[in-house]
Amino acid sequence: MKWFLRAGFISFVISSSGLALATLLTLYWRRCRNSKAIVPSPVPRPVLDISDYKVSVIDTAEQCEAYFKRLQDTTTFIGFDCEWVSDNQRNNESSYYPVALLQLAFPNKECALVRLSKIGRLTESLQKILTDKSSFKFGVGIMNDVTRLCEWSGTLTVSCIDLRNVAFRCGIRRNNGLGGLLEQLTDSVLTKSKEITCSNWERDVLSDDQILYAARDAIAGLIILSKLAEHKKRRTKSDSCQTMKSDTISEEEKSCVFSLCQGIIDVNYNIRNNSQPQKPQASGRTAAYSIRQSPLYYNCQLIAPDGTLLSTVDKRKVEWYLSKELGVLVSEDPPVLQLLFEPSGKPKKDREYYLTEKENICVVCGRKDSYIRKNVVPHEYRKFFPPKMKEHLSHDVLLLCVTCHQLSTHHDSIIKQQIALEYSAPLEASTQKFHEDPEKVKLRSLARALKGHKETLPKKRREDITETLAKHFNCEKDEVTDDMIEELLKIETRLHNPNYVSHGELVVKAVKEREDLVEFQQRWRQHFLDSMQPQYLPKLWSVYHNPQ
C-alpha cells in the first residue's frame, strides 16, 4: 500500500512538473513571438574579403590613361560605384557635390579607385570604357551615380544595370541595398560605417579604411552579379548559366548575364514597380517610350505637272491628294503622285533635303527593328517658335532606337540645365501651372465621406454634410440625390494659374531678346551631333539647314 501511494505521489509530481514546464515553454514562445529582444542574436558574419584583388589608387591623368588603356579588352562586366563629399564636409553653401572617387572592379581581380577630385577630368581611355555599349556596369543606385558623374564631366556612362532589377528577375523580392543583396547571396557582409561613408573623399591622401570601403563596394557588385547568375541557373536548371569565374568569362556565362539584363539596361530601379505584380504591357511599348508601329518615311514622291520633283511625302498625304482628286498616281513602286495643278513654287536648293529618300533606321546605331521619333530641338522650346520655323518641316525630326533615345534624353537634360542657368528660366517653374480650388476640394471630400461611410457616420455629421451639399446645389437637404454625390466625386478641383510661365516659354522669349532663334536651333543640332555622334543621318542633314 505504501509503495502504491509513493508511486502515485511520484507520478503526480512528474505530471505537475511536466505541466509547469510546458506552461513555461508556452510563455517563453509567446514572449519570443512578441518581443524581438528575446530572440538570440545571429552568429556574426565575416566582412567581405577582397585580399585576392589588386586595388590601385589612381590620382594622376597619366596613371589613369595608362591603366584603362591596358584594361580595355577585359571590361565586359564592371562593378561600378561613386563617392562624393557629403554636406557636413563642405564649408560653402553649394548644394552640388561632384564625384570625388570613381570605383571600378573587373573580373580579372583588379579594382581601380579613380580620384577624379585630383585628376579633374575623364581621360580618353576611361571615357572610352564608360561610353562603350559593350561594357556593362553593375551597381546599386547606379543611375544616380551616372547622372552625377555626367553633370560633372558631360560624359554619359552607358550600359548601366541596377543589381536590384537583376535580383528581382531572379526571384529575390526584398528591396535591398548593396549590403543586403550581398548578405542574401553570400556568407559575407559589408561594413557601412557612417564615419567612413560621410568622410572627406576629397582629402589629399585617402585613409586605409576609405580605400578598403570604396574597393569593397565596387567588388561587391561583381560578386553579387556572379551569385545572381548562379541563382538563375539553379532556378532554371540551365546549363548555359554557369557561375562566373574570376579571371575569364566564357561565352556561355556572358549569355546568361545578357539574358538577365535584357530590357533593364540604363533603367532606373523602381521600388513600387518591383514590389508589385505589373500588368503586361502591350507589344511594342516600354514604360516611357512608344515604339512606332509603322515606318516614319514612306518616301512617296510628289511631282509637278511638268515632272519636277517637289518633295517626298507621307502615304497619308498621297491618299489625301487622291481623295480630293488633286493628283494621280503615276507609279506604285516606287510610289509617285503627280499633281493636277501647278504648285505655287518650285523647290529651291536649300530645300533639297526634303527631296531625298530616307531610311527607317536609328540614325545613331543603324538599328532597323524598332525606332521612335526624336525631336532634335525639344518640343517644349519648338512649340513657342514662330510658325514659319516649325510648320511642315521634318528636318529636326529623326528616328532613334529605344536605347539611343534614352541616351539622347539624358544628354538633353544636361544642356537644359545649362540653358536654365543662362536664361534664368528654372526647369521647375516658380509658379504652378494649376492650383487647387479649396472649396471644390472640400465638396469632393464631403461627397466621398457620404458615399463611402454613410451608414457608419454619426447622424449629426451626416446631416451637416448633406446640408453643405444642399447649399452647393441650391436645394433642400432631402433633395440631395446619389447622382449629385457622384457629380461631386468627379468635380475638377484644379484651376489654371494665369501667372504660370513654362521653362520653354521663358527661354524662347529670352532668346528672341538676346539673339537669333536660328542660332538657338543650331545649338541643339550641334549638341545632338556632339553627344550622340550619329552614323546614319539622312543625306543633306545639316546643322545650318534653314529653308526660310
Image (cartoon, helix red, strand yellow):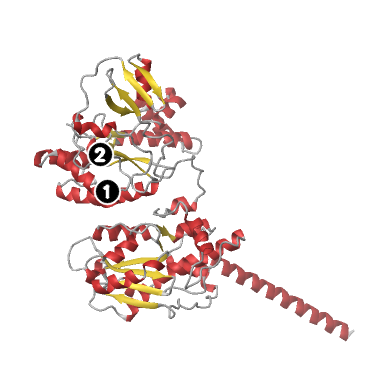
Above or below, comparing residue 453 to residue 278 in the picture:
above
Above or below, comparing residue 537 to residue 386 in the picture:
below
Above or below, comparing residue 338 to residue 107 in the picture:
above
The residue singled out by tag 2 in the image is: 540
The residue sitting at 24% across, 32% down in the picture is: 352
Question: In the figure, residue 12 lies in which quadrant?
Answer: bottom right
Where residue 100 sits: x, y (%)?
26, 68
Q: Could you tell me if residue 281 is visible in this image? A: yes
- Residue found at the far bottom of this picture: 2
Q: Amino acid at mark 1?
A: Asp
Where residue 230 sits: x, y (%)?
55, 65
Whole-angstrom CA distance, mark 1 to mark 2, is 23 Å
Q: How many marks?
A: 2
Q: Earlier in the sequence, mark 1 or mark 2?
A: 1
Secondary structure category for the residue under label 1: helix
Left or right position of 222 against 12: left
Secondary structure category for the residue under label 2: loop
Q: Amino acid at mark 2?
A: Leu
The residue singled out by tag 1 in the image is: 412
Q: Give the label, 1 or 2, closer to the camera.
A: 2
Q: Quadrant of the N terminus?
A: bottom right
